[in-house]
Image (cartoon, rainbow, N blue to C red):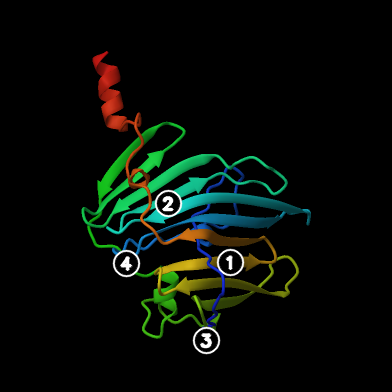
Amino acid sequence: MPTRLSLTAVFCTVLLAVAIPSTRASAQSFFMTPIPNAPFSGVVNIEQTIVRKDGSVMQLKSTREVARDTRGRIHNELRALNFASSTDTPELLHIHLYDPQTRISTEIDVRKRTFWTRTMDHPPSTEPPSIRFAAPDGDAPPNEFTKQEDLGIRVPAHGIRQTQTVTDENNGKEVAITDEYWYSQDLRINLMIKHSDPRKETTTMTVDQVTRTEPDPAFFEVPEGYVHPGAQAATEKAN
């Protein structure tokens, strides 16, 4: 059964960019709900502990900016992971933009200074998948191997913990793999996500510096000087 929690600080899940390889893509996903009339911006902090095959531990970190304007347009960054001891700003690798009014999704490759767009064929969800599936009437089928616990509600978030017990293929012992999601009904996003697999990694993603004012409009536009690959190829062919 589900576990629900609440937080007194503001957190957020994110899509984790990797210059250093990561071990679990699903634990790094961030769903930004493109809903109108709920503008905000925030800074996401990512901490990851990876267990190597020899038992040693590698500590990593990253940060990124996310934003949503009154129209519901979203800005979601992807940055590289740095070692925890580093004082460098993580490299910006990718930006995802989405406009719910036009259903146009834009992917920006910062390194190549290119972008491409596509029109989505269905409206986006207004809740993160983890919240929809954990609800009593969720879309996901029952899973006999997963336990959910309700951790209660506190301002400003509601937490859900999902625990799955598996058998370690190396020693035959049972291992508890947990995922926690802290959801803000006010912001309509997960405010924190934590994935823990003692055999491989623990990843925690939180957001702070949340501002409930209208973000800079430039956040939701393709930066100047970036080109569409098709247009770039046509220009090179003409020359």
> Which residue is tagged 2?
76
Q: Secondary structure at mark 2?
A: strand
Q: Nearer the viewer, mark 4 or mark 3?
A: 4
Contact (CB < 8 A) between labels 2 and 3? no
Q: Nearer the viewer, mark 1 or mark 2?
A: 2
Say whether residue 101 is left or right of residue 47. Answer: left
Amino acid at dot 1: Lys
> Which residue is tagged 4?
125
Q: Secondary structure at mark 3?
A: loop
Q: For mark 4, does the 10 Å Cα neighbourhood hold few (<14), some (14 to 19), or many (20 or more) residues?
A: few
Q: For mark 3, does the 10 Å Cα neighbourhood hold few (<14), some (14 to 19), or many (20 or more) residues?
A: some
Contact (CB < 8 A) between labels 4 and 3? no
Q: Earlier in the sequence, mark 4 or mark 1?
A: 4
Q: Secondary structure at mark 4?
A: loop
Q: Is residue 228 above or below residue 184?
A: above
Residue at the farthest top position: 239
From the top left corner, tell me how far across and down residue 195 is, in percent: 59, 66
Q: Earlier in the sequence, mark 4 or mark 2?
A: 2
Q: Which mark is residue 194?
A: 1
Say whether residue 147 is left or right of residue 125. Answer: right
Q: CA distance from mark 4 to mark 2?
A: 16 Å
Q: CA distance from mark 1 to mark 3?
A: 18 Å
Amino acid at dot 4: Ser
Say whether residue 170 is left or right of residue 189. Answer: right
Q: Earlier in the sequence, mark 4 or mark 3?
A: 3
> Which residue is tagged 3?
1
From the top left corner, tell me how far across and down residue 73 is, in percent: 31, 55
Q: Nearer the viewer, mark 1 or mark 3?
A: 1
Q: Nearer the viewer, mark 2 or mark 3?
A: 2
From the top left corner, tell me how far across and down residue 237 is, in percent: 27, 18
Q: Earlier in the sequence, mark 2 or mark 3?
A: 3
Nearest the viewer among 166 and 28 is 28
